[in-house]
Amino acid sequence: MATVFGKAVKRREDPRLITGHGQYTDDVRLPGLLYAAILRSPHAHARIRKIDTSQALRHPGVVAVFTGQDIQGKMGTIPTAWLPPDSGIVTPPHHALAVDRVRYVGDGVAMVIAEDRYTARDALDLIQVEYEVLPAVVDQEAAMQEGAPQLHDEAPGNVAFHWKVGNFDPSAVQDADVVIRQRFRQQRLVPNPMEPRSAVADYNPATGEMTMWLTSQNPHIHRFLLSGILGIPEHKLRIIATDVGGGFGSKIPCYPDEALVGFAAKTLGRPVKWTEDRREHFMATTHGRDHYDDVELYGKKDGTILAIRVRATANMGAYLSTAAPGVPTILFGLIISGPYQIPYAEADVYGVFTNTTPTDAYRGAGRPEATYLLERMVDLFAREIGMDPVEVRRKNLVRAEQFPYNNPMGLTYDSGDYHGALHKALEMAGYAEFRRQQEEARRAGRLVGVGVTTYVEICGLGPSQVAGAVGFQGGLWESAQVRIHPTGKVTVFTGSSPHGQGEETTFAQIVADRLHIPVEDVEIVHGDTARISMGWGTYGSRSTPVGGSAIALATERVIEKAKKIAAHMLEVGEADVEFEEGQFRVKGAPSRQVSLGDVTLQAYLAWNLPPGVEPALEGQAFYDPSNFTYSFGTHICQVEVDRDTGEVKILRYIAVDDCGRVINPMIAEGQVHGGIVQGIGQALWEGAHYDEQGQLVTGTFMDYAMPRAHFFPTFETAFQETPSPHNPLGVKGIGETGTIASTPTVVNAVLDALSPYGVRDIEMPLTPERVWRAMKGAQEA
Amino acid sequence: MEATRMTVTVRVNGREYTRAVEPRLLLVHFLRDELGLTGTHIGCDTSQCGACTVLLNGEAVKSCTVLAVQADGAEVTTIEGLGDLSHLHPVQEGFWEKHGLQCGFCTPGVIMTAAGMLAQNPNPTEEEIREGLEGVICRCTGYQNIVRAVQYAAEKMKGAGAETEVAAAGADASAGGDA
């Protein structure tokens, strides 16, 4: 049968999701279910003097109220699981409910458990808390100043860690003709998957077993961490996360809330559900980005880039979330030289505590921040030396024959054809023609501009040995089990935990392709720790390169075993048998064959197996990649700026991405679309703002501008395929590329449009007001 | 203190339900918690995201902005009643064909919004479709394939004649609850 690898197979997950039969966590209903609500601090920084819960406890329908004092010693604190080495990192205790002090608006203070949702919420209003308000600090640079309010005794000066990497050497830039210096504000974003976080916990006091449904991107990591926090042995704790409504990084961390739900269920002996509302999501789900980046680029007049340096201060919020410290360090600093042959680079990063919601991974996680500053600097450099920004890129991009390429931070880029993707995108965009039209448009008084980004991304996280070396407190391999049932139907168990990426389909394509069976005969099981032995989850564009590769290997093991049985059935040596078109055939005598179905049945009947071969037919693999994968590409955007209002209109958006071999182009394209929109969201509209007292003033969808359908034209996308040489599928990862590339592309396009004004920088998001002020300011200068 | 309850009778997906509810109960909680129709989702608390969109007497409304008591005597169609796998509504089919969903959480609301939109304007331009989706937020798809899905549905409905009618009541009561 025809191969299904590379085909736009319709998604297997869709039938249930388009008919309302998905099961997200809040959809779970259990007999005797109680509902939880969490009282959150209205102050950014305060001492808790007294909490009076008596009135709430008397309220009809209220079953229990817990405060920080109540849970002290009965459950563990919330851990940080990424500790970058040689960074002096401190991890002050993060209590699930504040004990004596709150440190951000949204910090948990008490939890109410009631018979229904509305009653639980009503009772929050009946809890009396006496606060002593303390001075707050929300800006990371302000927090590092002397005399700033201090968040944790363990972290003097509010510094959580200081990490430095690179090979920069002043003597290396002695030949530089130009030094560009620029400061960038990488604003804070709110992930906002459409499904709010939710947890349902069901504890059986007789067996000691706990089942938790959880909005998780990595249920096994949650099992591992919650087991410790709740004191429930790992084999008695089951985490289920089958339908998860998006995550974008915000469902990686282990949060206080879900731990509290587990604690309540265990304590009360009744199932408990908690679901955040959107306001809580804004306050108490991790945010992303939030840097100041001071950057230096050294170059020569001929366009050669000699070195890049960044000093970053990253706002970590009030506590260090699960993976947070790795984001502005490892995932940022190691890739700041990007796709270019820049011999010297350095990143010097401070992670700082402030009275704000903790930050953690948000789609791209560190890599968008790195790509943004690099691409902005390349354009500033091009402008400075009077060279077309595309020429500068072309001159500095790593060349196809240089792979594998070692960047100055010690990463080895696996494969690439950066110039190929650039060329293809320029062709699609009609770049030369656009430059000509731009001249005409300018003469006619119109402000049109183009931005070009060439990027490379660390995907496929990653080799476990490297994970350990960079302080990640876990492995980054993946598990897969492929089971062919006696009737030939196949169940695949994967440690990846997709939540919108379509791997129930693409993973089935991998298996169907190898076994020569219909995709419909393959079922992908994910997101359940009781059914899947182990897994490290879905983030860092790792599911396809790592989880998919594990599946490919497990499938090969099944075929290997089946081949032994087939050879025995055909009474020939194993080396004389080949597997093609679903048949095991004797080489040179293809009419002598047995089908995979026949072999499978014999494997289960086990009446006549070859010596040393065990019954049944399944394969298992634990795949630990030997390297990361490096997706790359070129994005181009054309914009027009309204001279009178400052409004930016996107005229065209072109994306050429190379994520290695594409399993399902329809799904890959969908990933690119979504990524582009999130990245443009950062460029033009999104931004979380705190006032000086630490109040989150963008706390709802009314104040935080989410991208909408009518903000965009139709995107023009294409793929180039340069296989990764080191995994069995040749795949790389596509989930984050759009977000990484689109932000600088759009901002550079706007600044190109404004080049008649000589505007050098506008702080994101580039709202009409900011663009208008930049034009106005330039005119007046 | 037991809150005053009011009796409401609502016809949901062609089946009548009578319940005594708190006057403040939102229609979306009525559907999800009282009737167990969990296909309708809640994505925000300020009526911005549209994940909870259902058809109320044939018109797309955000069910987080309607009280259950306001729906007394009304006909409601939720995603469960729009079409099932053996007989998908053209918009549902379009979403499957054109990869109009990823995580699927906003999807029921977006499908109901699109169904309501096409009932009023069976021949929308791309711009009209994008404007018509103004009231919904999807964080995954970048909207492009949602637009394609709606275009697919519009084409399909053009050819199907009678199917262009998006009835307020669903064809049968396939999901949950008792009368």
Image: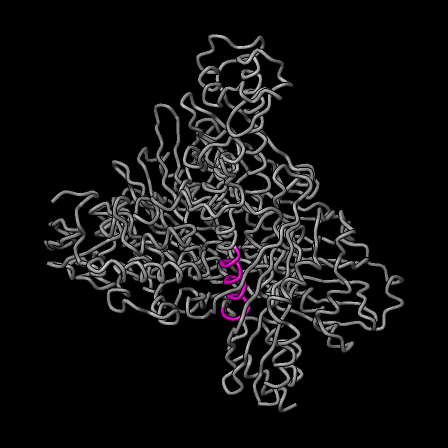
Position of residue A285 measured from the top left corner of the image (x, y, whole percent): 46, 54
Front-most of residues A722 and B176 = A722
The location of residue A277, given as percent across then percent down, is 36, 55
Q: Nearer the viewer, residue A291 or A583?
A: A583
Please identify the quadrant where the C terminus of chain A is shown: bottom right
- Please, is residue A755 above or below residue A352 in the view? below
Corner quadrant of residue A114: top left
Q: Nearer the viewer, residue A663 or A210?
A: A663
Q: Residue furthest bottom?
A: A780
Is B80 placed left or right of A556 in the picture?
left
- Residue A311's image quarter? bottom right
Q: Left of A693 or right of it: where is A66?
A: left
Left or right of residue A49, residue A553 in this image: right
- Residue displayed at 60% across by 71% down: A747
Q: Is residue A673 magenta?
A: yes
Q: Position of residue A74 (x, y in %)?
A: 45, 36
Q: Is residue A631 magenta?
A: no
Coloring scheme used: one colour
Q: Which residues are magenta?
A: A672-685
Answer yes or no: is residue A70 visible. Answer: no
Instruction: Where is residue A756? Give x, y as percent.
Output: 65, 85
Most common secondary structure along the magenta stretch: helix
